[in-house]
Every structure is written in structure tokens, then in C-alpha cells.
């Protein structure tokens, strides 16, 4: 396994279900991110974790609940989602988490989870 | 309010010719810019970046140009190859704080053999 791995790759869930997305990075990075990509929209940053501490919550509804038990793993717990939450959810990691230039801030992405909410 | 814009959703180029992908931004706090490339069923992969203190960065067939006064950057690929066919995202990072990357909507490049 190399890089950033996301599971599952595809998920279909009803509005009353609870499910979790998992992300694992094998790069020794200290920061991890969740993004949402809806059709014909840019990637939207949802959450940023730096050294297992959530440092950014980009006005995301509470039905999305992130968890970062250690610097290698990141989860996104989903509960009572709406059909408009159907999207591609991408996880990324980087060595550093500060703003500005620098190779340590380059983010490496997983392949994403394609979520459909019925 | 979209702070990073890629106004061309798609671009077709003949193999061997130059591909030019454009990106405009509105936030003057951005000081680091990146291009990512995405194949179907894969996540975006980093391609090339440029800091606001430079106006050009080159890496093999890929060159990124930054015009700060116009708040415009472009990615040049020369010569273009069929394997370059992908969606290209422009991204920008502000100085300071935590890394809040803002992405454009992407440009789908097709290189025709």
C-alpha cells in the first residue's frame, strides 16, 4: 500500500442510515483533509486536521462528523444525510499544515468515495 | 463567490502541440499556486507549483506562469502527449494560517493523437 487509501470506493445509503468513510495515509504526514466534490463545482474543503487536532471546520453541517484517532487515519461519519450530499468525497494529506508556499504543504489525495444518498 | 476560476471547461489539442490552461483568481492573499491533474477514478495528483515571488516555474514539459498584477496563471504543456489527457485543477493557498486550499472547477484536456 502506498499513498492515501480511501474506503469504500462507492457507497449508497438511505437518508436514515449511518455510515463512515475511512482514509489512511502511509506517507508519514501530519495533516489530513476532507474535501467534497459535487458535479460541476470546485473541490470544497470540509475539515483540516493537524497532528490529530481539528483546526478547520469549513461551515460543514453537523450530519458530517470527522474523527482523527491518529495521524495516519481519518474518518468521516455520516448520519441522516440529504440527497444533495451525494458527491465525491476526497481525503488528502500533507507533511505540513501551515499556509503559504513550500513542498511540505503539497497535498496528496486518495481516489475518493463516490457517495449516493437516496 | 468563486475565488479561483477556470473559465474553459474543456480543451482539445493535437499531439505534439502546446496546451495552455488558464486560471484566474480574485483573492490577493493567495501566495502559492498549484496545478493538479486528475484521471478518471483517481484522486488529483500534484503536478507543479509556483510561489508568488516568482513569475515562472518549469519542470520538464510543464511550465507555470504567474502574472500577479492580472491575478492570472497559466499552465503550458509542450509538447502535449495523449497521456496528458486528464482534468487539470488550478489551486491557490493563502499566506499564513492553516492550509485552506481553494480549487478551480477544472479544465478537461484532450490530446488527440
Image: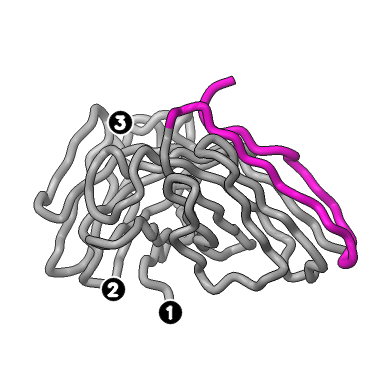
Q: Position of residue A65 (x, y in %)?
A: 66, 61
Q: Position of residue B101 (x, y in %)?
A: 39, 57
On the image, which quarter does residue B31 sit in?
A: bottom left
* Residue, disc 1: B1
Task: Compare marks 2 and 1 and give the one earlier in the sequence.
Answer: 1
Magenta segment range? Answer: A1-28
Labels 2 and 1 in the same subunit:
yes
Q: Residue at x 82, y 62 (%)?
A: A117
Instruction: Say which mark, if any, is on residue B26.
Output: 2
SS state under label 3: loop
Please identify the quadrant where the N terminus of chain A is shown: top right
**Distance from the alpha carbon under mark 2 to that under mark 1:** 10 Å
Instruction: Say which mark, if any, is on residue B79.
Output: 3
On the image, which quarter does residue A2 sit in?
A: top right
Labels 3 and 2 in the same subunit:
yes
| Residues at discs 2 and 1 in contact (Cβ within 8 Å) | yes
Q: Residue at x 36, y 33 (%)?
A: B80
**Distance from the alpha carbon under mark 1 to that under mark 3:** 35 Å
Is B21 on the left-hand or right-hand side of A55?
left
Task: Compare marks 3 and 2 and give the one earlier in the sequence.
Answer: 2
SS state under label 1: loop
Task: Compare marks 1 and 3 and give the one earlier in the sequence.
Answer: 1
Q: Position of residue B59 (x, y in %)?
A: 23, 31
Amino acid at each position: 500500500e502506498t499513498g492515501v487509501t480511501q474506503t469504500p470506493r462507492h457507497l449508497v445509503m438511505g437518508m436514515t442510515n449511518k455510515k463512515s468513510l475511512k482514509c489512511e495515509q502511509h506517507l508519514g504526514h501530519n495533516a489530513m483533509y476532507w474535501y467534497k466534490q459535487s458535479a460541476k463545482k470546485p473541490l470544497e474543503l470540509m475539515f483540516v486536521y493537524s497532528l490529530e487536532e481539528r483546526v478547520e471546520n469549513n461551515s460543514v453541517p453537523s450530519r458530517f462528523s470527522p474523527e482523527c484517532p491518529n495521524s495516519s487515519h481519518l474518518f468521516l461519519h455520516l448520519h441522516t444525510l440529504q440527497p444533495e450530499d451525494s458527491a465525491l468525497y476526497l481525503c488528502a494529506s500533507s507533511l505540513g499544515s501551515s499556509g503559504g508556499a513550500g513542498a511540505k504543504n503539497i497535498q496528496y489525495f486518495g481516489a475518493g468515495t463516490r457517495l449516493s444518498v437516496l | 463567490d468563486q475565488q479561483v476560476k477556470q473559465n474553459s471547461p474543456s480543451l482539445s489539442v493535437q499531439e505534439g502541440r502546446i496546451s495552455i490552461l488558464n486560471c484566474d483568481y480574485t483573492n490577493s492573499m493567495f501566495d502559492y499556486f498549484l496545478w493538479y491533474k486528475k484521471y478518471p477514478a483517481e484522486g488529483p495528483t500534484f503536478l507543479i507549483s509556483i510561489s508568488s515571488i516568482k513569475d515562472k516555474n518549469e519542470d520538464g514539459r510543464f511550465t507555470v506562469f504567474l502574472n500577479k498584477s492580472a491575478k492570472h496563471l497559466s499552465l503550458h504543456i509542450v509538447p502535449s502527449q495523449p497521456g496528458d489527457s486528464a482534468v487539470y485543477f488550478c489551486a491557490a493557498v493563502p499566506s499564513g494560517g492553516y492550509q485552506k486550499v481553494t480549487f478551480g472547477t477544472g479544465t478537461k484536456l484532450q490530446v488527440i493523437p
